[in-house]
Image (cartoon, rainbow, N blue to C red):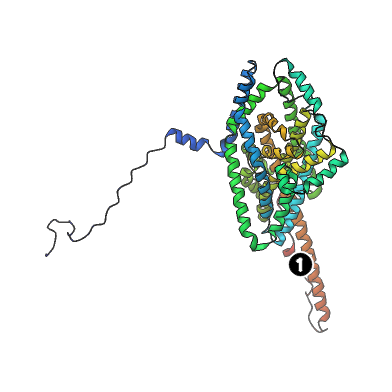
Amino acid sequence: MTGANPIKGAPDEDVEMPDTPPLKPTPPPPSRWQVFKKEAFQKKNLMYFMLAGVVVGIALGAGLYGLHLNKRVVEIIGYPGELFLNALQELVLPLIALALLNGVLSLRHSTAGAGRVMGWALFYYFLSMVLAVILGIALTYIIRPGRDTPFEHGSGGDCAAKNTDTIMSKKTVATQDTLESLLNVGRDMLPKNIIKASAESSYLGIMVFMIAFGVVLSGMGPTAEPLIQILETANDVIMKLVWLVIYLTPFCIASLICSTILQACNLLVLLKSLSYYVATVLTGFAVHSIFSLPLTLFLLARVNPLSIMRAYIPAFAMGFGTSSSAATMPMTMECASKYGCRDSLVKFVIPLGTNINRDGAALYEATSVIFIAQAHGLSLSIGNVIVIAITATLAAIGAASIPMSALVSMITVLQAVGMQEYVKDLSVILAVDWLLGMFRTITNIWGDCCAVTVVEMWARRHDNKLARQAKKADVVKADTIVVALPASSDTNGAGDFSDDSAAHSALPVKGI
């Protein structure tokens, strides 16, 4: 055979063989450290690292407390925590502003039916959060957890005298004429210059402006979509930055707690006051969850709160473990569907509530700010308390569904009443935030569960009303047709709408 290769099975010389790509080397298996980093540094484990930071900070502070370290050494120990608080203050304005704005913009695609449901949900969210804030403020003034607990730091024998002088000099810092304070609430909500208000940390006006801006932008249609996309991207960027800061929390919280203990004039008095504070907040969560929310369920929906509470036990357990209502949202939606709420409402009300309904956070922020004021001997006027209530509600709405979000937005409330110089005292609250955060999340989730139940019952009543109106209209129409028929026509069964009435009736909800 001409031109055949004599070697059997060998290719002809004139045939070009394709180049075989070189084999890629098999990557080495990940090291134990790489596996540890991948598994350990996840959001679900953040709470455990925070708890470890609390333990380390308390242990170091207690161990070094008796050494009476130099002021400069204590300052160096607390330096990472100081930078941590500065980073939070730097991010709090864009975080709250963009979160509120995007929350309003997220509702722009609502249909007519969804708009009605949204109105019901927003009404209930606002009602429950106002009740939570009022309850928190009332309990703080009744229990007074910050009494006789100066947070002023000093050293040596002049500590008590230094604290006494400082407290007496600041007795009237936050006190204004009641009428003037009430008028200033309106001025803060509508400042002359929004840029100047931002520079002066007047966040109440910024919140109102962002809500109004979002409402107007939502109604501009397709022409506003490019700007909306930019704002949504900016919100995502800020969220990633916040998470970067939060990932540093375990180390920074140890620094803050240790330096706070070392600067405390009377450690036992501080611990006693902190225990009063924890008891006040937990009492507020319990009263709101056991009495306020069930009362709204009974009055607005006429349902048994105990049966609803039992249905959501899996969601409560998951929220207690994750300290995040966003992470618990799928479980909450599943519990609501199993209970009998229609899927269309569950998929609308629960995600909306996860983003804006934060009864526990609102109560927590209002209580904490008044606690800090009491610890410094500040006398808050009625106007100041109203500002705290309004700002705590709006800040809780704008807070993201992440761990420590309420603590971050608490800076907004402090600055709204001119207490920005006491942001450093959040280090005391940081020591117990991991504990309060779990119960705060349960309160937030329970508020969402009550909201979807109330909206479901209102939707059923609305459907029944429409069904009755439709049936009545059909009957009137049939009667008109009967009158118009000639006398010889057969009218048997012309007004029988028994089958249609079943089609118009609302389906019962299981368990309600």
Q: Looking at this view, is 183 or 128 the one in front?
A: 183
Q: Quadrant of residue 287?
A: top right
Residue at 75 percent of width and 42 percent of height:
391
Q: Quadrant of residue 50?
A: top right
Query: Horizontal and vertical percent for residue 400?
Result: 65, 44
Above or below 58: residue 36: below
Query: Horizontal and vertical percent for residue 261?
Result: 66, 23
Residue designated by label 1: 498
Drawn side of residue 353 relative to residue 378, left or right: left
Residue at 65 percent of width and 60 percent of height:
224
Drawn side of residue 240 relative to residue 382, left or right: left
Above or below 454: residue 505: below
Above or below 142: residue 23: below
Give the secondary structure at mark 1: helix
Residue at 66 percent of width and 25 percent of height:
260
Q: Looking at this view, is 229 or 181 the one in front?
A: 181
Q: Looking at this view, is 130 or 443 the one in front?
A: 130
Query: Horizontal and vertical percent for residue 313?
Result: 67, 40
Q: Looking at this view, is 395 or 458 the one in front?
A: 395
| Residue 304 is at least partly visible in this image | no
Identify the amino acid type marked 1: Ser
Location of the N terminus by quadrant is bottom left
